[in-house]
Amino acid sequence: MGAKTATPVGFQKHDHAACSQNALQAADERCAAEGLRLTPVRRKVLELLLREHRALGAYAILDLLRDEGFGSQPPVAYRALDFLVEHGFVHKIERLNAFVACAHPSENHSPAFMICRLCDAVAEAQSAPSRGSLGAAARATGFLIEKTVVEAEGVCPACIDKADA
């Protein structure tokens, strides 16, 4: 998991079916390699987040799970989300109190999220805060950064014409 910078994912046109299928296949392979258990509920939550390509709250995920024939109790969704976040398949967007499928699940990275304030679409890019001003501040104080998440709010390309000038 090197220092290469991947293209942000989320706003550009792409083959969504292939994108989702590749992510699910990568999750299956990683779980098999690391002895992790991608249960049917965990896999379905990941599929739902990949299908939406936007952040979803836990209760929205629970509603979709119920529609798909899975349990309707909140712990069902929260346990699946906890597993997926812990293993880097999903990220929590704190600003929205919602979750989004990781766009770079095979890479160790610090995500940077661009969140559309009009449609809640989310694009994920990689950031390198340890190299910027945050990293300089940390070094100056003797602090070791272990994890960061950057969240920026704005307007996505699809909503730019709807934005207030």
Image (cartoon, rainbow, N blue to C red):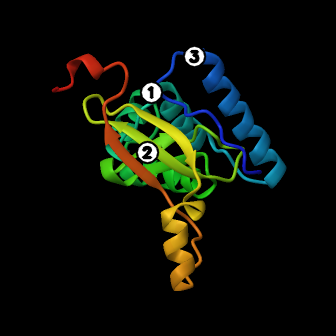
Indicate the quadrant containing the C terminus: top left, top right, bottom left or bottom right.
top left
User: How far from the left and from the top, in percent, is residue 77?
Assistant: 44, 47
Q: What residue would you read off at disc 3?
A: 14
Q: Which of 67 and 9 is in front in this view?
A: 9
Instruction: Give the farthest residue toward the bottom.
Output: 142
Mark 1 lies on a secondary structure that is helix
Which is nearer the N-term, disc 3 or disc 2? 3
Neighbour tally class for label 1: few under 14, some 14-19, many 20 plus, Cα within 10 Å: some
In three-dimensional space, the C-alpha distance between marks 3 and 2, rounded to whole angstroms, equals: 21 Å
Which is nearer the N-term, disc 3 or disc 1? 3
User: How far from the left and from the top, in percent, is residue 13?
Assistant: 52, 15
Marks 2 and 3: in contact by CB < 8 Å? no
Which is nearer the N-term, disc 2 or disc 1? 1
Relative to residue 14, is residue 105 drawn left or right?
right
On screen, residue 60 above or below 1: above
User: How far from the left and from the top, in percent, is residue 22?
Assistant: 70, 27
User: How far from the left and from the top, in percent, is residue 38?
Assistant: 67, 45
Q: Kindly identify the residue that appears in the image at 46 percent across and 25 percent down.
A: 11
Q: Which of 74 and 155 is in front in this view?
A: 155
In three-dimensional space, the C-alpha distance between marks 3 and 1, rounded to whole angstroms, equals: 14 Å
Depth-wise, is mark 3 or mark 1 nearer the camera? 3
What residue type is disc 2 on?
Phe
On screen, residue 122 above or below 78: above
Relative to residue 93, is residue 34 drawn left or right?
right
Residue 52 badge: 1
The picture quadrant where one finds residue 104 is: top right
Relative to residue 22, is residue 41 drawn left or right?
left
What residue type is disc 1 on?
Glu
What residue type is disc 3 on?
His
Q: What residue would you read off at disc 2?
A: 99
Q: Kindly identify the residue that appears in the image at 54 percent across and 46 percent down.
A: 90
Mark 3 lies on a secondary structure that is loop
